[in-house]
């Protein structure tokens, strides 16, 4: 299993390579006509905007992030724009209702958290060093009169209302606040063109209207050309929205919101019809490696080799190799009956958050080297009473550390590393006990 620690390592030498790379990975939706020539001519500086209204990015953000990664690997320069200013307004694209607006302090805190997450993907040093910018730096000091005079004059209301992001909201209503978002994003593109030499903006396919408004503003203000590229919007094979957990919530990159194990399991749950696409979209595995995994899906789908490769690679990138390995171990234990004696310290720590966990406190003065398993079952909340625990034991329904339990106590020499006891009721209900 290979995980590239630095996304710029082994970068293709050909600066014209990004479009071909994005195309075979099925990440290319549409682009302006002159973009291939711009790539062929030399280094291009490109940007993608990220919404800072939450303190973490989520897996739905990974497509544009990977777009920046592929550009950087080809020798181009990525800019990640955190929308500290536009985040106070809200983009109407893909939405059916007005979003809640955030205050500047909250957005600044969120922007810093996002910067740390992007650093897992992009190299911020070297000749194609990435850069993170915040549009609050220029939008928050922009006067209304200046904005209307220098930007608003270039756009007719008819032009703006013809954009899909606006048309889709007209029936239910759209505020003037969100109506102006298109112009603010266009102004961002112009400002980055002036400050950083940005000539390419990328985003989801629903961003095409906003991005092309920026092209218009640059052409009219600067008399120069710029480019646009969009990625497809991702859905699962069954038509459901990509990026939601089984409970319907977002899958976050922040381990406090979505644990590395839960993150790993999200990718392990990929449908066989989707996993090939997801390997192309979300990993840097080579074409040969992915085609080999495609074959494994066709010939032996039960082994889920492609899902394992996908889950490990993305989890290692977002969290760490250690976190991915621990998630692998926990997954194998809970779903594949792996031997718990082989669990690492990291896996045992991760397991505490994923199953029932308790510190062992004896109900009475114990033997010095024994754990009362009947009492442990109560501490873990697996049974309601000692009598219920005893009946379960007599029926052969309890295992400890992977072995059927025949008596109500376990000696300390049978504990797992770190003095843990893994208790299982039936086939699926687990509890972990730590014995001080």
Image (cartoon, rainbow, N blue to C red):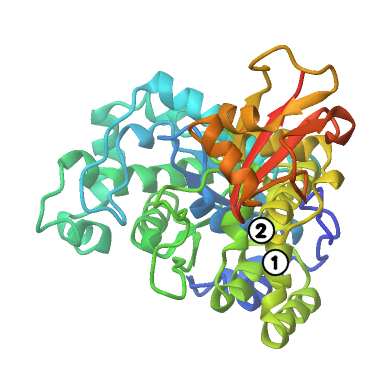
The N terminus - image quarter? bottom right
| Mark 2 Cα shell of 10 Å, populated few (<14), some (14-19), many (≥20) | few
**Pointer 1 local density, CA inside 10 Å: few below 14, some 14–19, many at least 20:** few
Viewer-side residue, 198 vs 378:
378
Residue under the image location 81 percent in, 60 percent down: 11
Visible residue check, residue 143? yes
**Looking at the rendering, in which quadrant would you find the C terminus?**
top right
Nearer to us in this view, 181 or 110:
110
Residue 132 appearing in the image: no
Is the residue 128 above or below the residue 291 in the image? above
Give the left or right position of residue 231, taking residue 177 as reference: right
Could you say where residue 183 lies in the image, as x and y percent from the top left? 30, 46
- Whichever of callouts 1 and 2 sits on the residue coming sooner in the sequence is 1
Q: Nearer the viewer, mark 1 or mark 2?
A: 2
Q: Is residue 39 above or below residue 90?
A: below
Of residue 21 and residue 370, the one placed in the foreground of this image is 370
Whole-percent x, y for residue 374 in the image: 64, 32
Q: Is residue 210 left or right of residue 254?
A: left
| Distance from the alpha carbon under mark 1 to that under mark 2 | 52 Å
Question: Which residue sits furthest bottom?
Answer: 299
Residue, disc 1: 41
Left or right of residue 52: residue 359: right
Residue 188, placed above or below residue 379: below
Closer-to-camera residue (152/209): 209
Q: Which mark is residue 349?
A: none
Secondary structure of the residue carrying tag 2 is helix
Q: Position of residue 387 (x, y in %)?
A: 53, 34
Q: Residue at x 61, y 51 (%)?
A: 395
- State the image coordinates of residue 289 (x, y, percent, origin top left): 79, 74
Q: Secondary structure at mark 1?
A: helix
Task: Give the residue number, with chain letter if any, for mark 2.
Answer: 335
């Amino acid at each position: 299993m290979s995980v590239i620690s630095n996304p710029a390592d082994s970068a293709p030498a050909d600066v014209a390579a990004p479009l071909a790379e994005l195309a075979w990975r099925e990440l290319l939706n549409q682009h302006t006509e002159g973009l291939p020539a711009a790539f062929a001519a030399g280094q291009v500086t490109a940007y993608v905007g990220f919404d800072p209204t939450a303190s973490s990015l989520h897996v739905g953000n990974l497509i544009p992030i990977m777009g920046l990664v592929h550009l950087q690997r080809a020798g181009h320069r990525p800019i990640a724009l955190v929308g500290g200013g536009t985040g106070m307004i809200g983009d109407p694209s893909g939405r059916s209702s007005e979003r809640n607006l955030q205050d500047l302090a909250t957005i600044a805190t969120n922007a810093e958290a996002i910067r740390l997450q992007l650093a897992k993907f992009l190299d911020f040093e070297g000749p194609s060093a990435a850069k993170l910018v915040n549009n609050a730096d220029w939008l928050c000091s922009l006067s209304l009169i200046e904005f209307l005079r220098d930007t608003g004059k270039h756009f007719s209301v008819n032009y703006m209302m013809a954009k899909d992001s606006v048309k889709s909201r007209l029936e239910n209503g759209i505020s003037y606040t969100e109506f102006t978002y298109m112009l603010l994003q266009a102004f961002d593109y112009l400002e980055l063109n002036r400050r950083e030499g940005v000539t390419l903006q990328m985003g989801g396919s629903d961003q095409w209207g906003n991005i092309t408004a920026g092209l218009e503003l640059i052409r009219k203000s600067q008399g120069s050309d710029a480019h646009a590229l969009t990625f497809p919007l991702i859905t699962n094979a069954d038509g459901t929205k990509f990026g939601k957990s089984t409970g319907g919530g977002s899958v976050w990159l922040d381990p406090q919101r979505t644990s590395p194990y839960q993150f790993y399991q999200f990718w392990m749950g990929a449908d066989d019809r989707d996993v090939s696409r997801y390997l192309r979209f979300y990993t840097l595995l080579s074409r040969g490696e992915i085609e080999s995994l495609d074959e494994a899906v066709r010939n032996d789908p039960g082994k889920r080799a492609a899902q394992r490769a996908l889950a490990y690679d993305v989890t290692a990138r977002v969290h760490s190799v250690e976190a991915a390995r621990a998630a692998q171990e926990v997954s194998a234990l809970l779903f594949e009956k792996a031997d718990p004696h082989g669990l690492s310290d990291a896996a045992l720590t991760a397991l505490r958050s994923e199953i029932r966990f308790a510190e062992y406190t004896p109900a009475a003065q114990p033997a010095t080297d024994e754990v009362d398993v009947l009492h442990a079952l109560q501490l873990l909340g697996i049974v309601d009473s000692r009598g219920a625990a005893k009946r379960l034991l007599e029926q052969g329904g309890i295992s400890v550390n992977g072995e059927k339990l025949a008596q109500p106590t376990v000696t300390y020499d049978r504990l797992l590393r770190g003095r843990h006891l893994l208790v299982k009721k039936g086939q699926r209900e687990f509890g972990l006990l730590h014995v001080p």
